[in-house]
């Protein structure tokens, strides 16, 4: 049964919208709203067909990194003298198709100048809505994990601070994995981000940032908890908190990795 839009109270309309978002219909497909209640114009001499109201099915934004996108990203990234300029350069960059389906650019959170910088994978729904990395369930777990070794995003003292970003600044549609082209197009920004934030150590959370930063095909299962060297920094690969939420038995490994990090910082 369909309810005419004009008979909904504002509260019911909001609840209906929240439900659409809850079931995953949270992507705008076209630039302009379509009036699906308007009958199609009848051809001359014909009567109009009955109107079937189509179901809105979210579609994936096709990966369409231009061949020159990486070079453009490199040029913009290297021209950014500080983090604010880098954020503006990323926000103005149109060489990665993911941006078109995202609500916000997710740049960073926490204390620039912190000893530890965390690189995650890609924004999820909550991060996309708020424009900040790791604010959903996996972000809450991440905060609890690092608080257990005395590190916090909000810490006034950089020695106890965390600086957090994501390898990819835009949410992929339906949270699919970013394609290699999409990742390649934003990698120059990530490298510059790390150089400008100048942490003492880098933690790469999950397989995607491990691959992006370490440029290796070795899987995370073998890399996690082992110090690596990349971009002139010690790099510790860890299991992504999202994976820990799905497989809590791995929290034991994550705790061992946190202690490895703590040892390095003392
Ligand atoms: N997972 C990530 O890797 N990054 C985010 O910002 C959110 C979830």
Image (cartoon, helix red, strand yellow):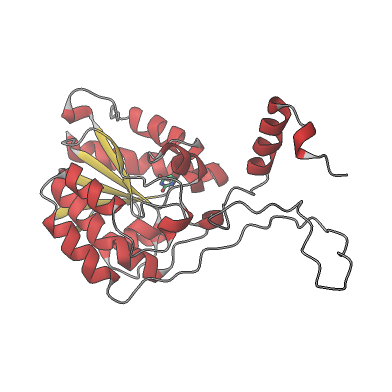
Q: Is residue 106 above or below residue 188?
A: above
As drawn, which residue projects farthest toward the bottom? 67
Residue 145 in the image: x percent, y percent? 39, 34
Viewer-side residue, 52 vs 70: 52
Q: Is residue 214 visible?
A: yes
Q: Is residue 148 visible?
A: no
Left or right placement of residue 93 versus residue 85 in this view: right
Tell me which corner region of the image, top left, top right, bottom left or bottom right, holds residue 65.
Answer: bottom left
Residue 225 in the image: x percent, y percent? 32, 50
Viewer-side residue, 188 vs 64: 64
Residue pictured at 22% horizontal, 38% vertical: 263
Residue 158 in the image: x percent, y percent? 17, 29
- Quarter holding the C terminus is top left
- Quarter holding the N terminus is top right
Q: Is residue 156 above or below residue 54?
A: above
Residue pictured at 69% horizontal, 52% vertical: 35
Viewer-side residue, 127 vs 46: 46
As drawn, which residue projects farthest toward the front? 45
Left or right placement of residue 105 versus residue 126 in this view: left
Residue 84 in the image: x percent, y percent? 19, 42
Viewer-side residue, 134 vs 252: 134
Tell me which corner region of the image, top left, top right, bottom left or bottom right, holds residue 207.
Answer: bottom left
Residue pictured at 66% horizontal, 38% vertical: 17
């Amino acid at each position: 049964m369909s309810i005419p839009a004009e008979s909904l109270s504002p509260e019911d309309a909001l609840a209906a919208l929240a439900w659409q978002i809850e079931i995953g219909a949270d992507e705008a497909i076209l630039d302009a709203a379509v009036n699906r209640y308007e009958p199609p114009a009848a051809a001359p001499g014909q009567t109009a067909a009955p109107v079937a109201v189509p179901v809105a099915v979210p579609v994936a934004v096709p990966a369409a990194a231009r061949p020159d996108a990486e070079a453009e990203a490199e040029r913009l990234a290297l021209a950014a003298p500080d983090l604010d300029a880098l954020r503006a350069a990323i926000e103005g960059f149109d060489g990665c198709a993911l941006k078109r389906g995202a609500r916000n650019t997710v740049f960073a959170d926490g204390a620039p100048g912190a000893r530890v910088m965390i690189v995650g994978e890609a924004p999820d729904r909550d991060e996309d809505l708020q424009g900040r990395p790791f604010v959903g369930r996996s972000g809450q777990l991440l905060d609890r994990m690092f608080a257990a070794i005395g590190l916090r995003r909000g810490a006034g003292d950089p020695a106890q601070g965390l600086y957090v970003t994501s390898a990819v600044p835009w949410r992929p549609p339906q949270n699919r994995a970013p394609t290699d082209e999409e990742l390649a197009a934003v990698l120059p920004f990530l490298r510059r981000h790390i150089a400008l934030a100048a942490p003492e150590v880098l933690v790469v959370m999950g397989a995607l940032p491990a691959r992006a930063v370490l440029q290796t095909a070795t899987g995370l299962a073998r890399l996690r908890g082992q110090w690596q060297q990349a971009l002139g920094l010690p790099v510790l690969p860890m299991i992504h908190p999202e994976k820990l939420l799905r497989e809590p038995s791995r929290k034991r490994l994550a705790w061992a990795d946190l202690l490895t990090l703590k040892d390095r910082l003392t």
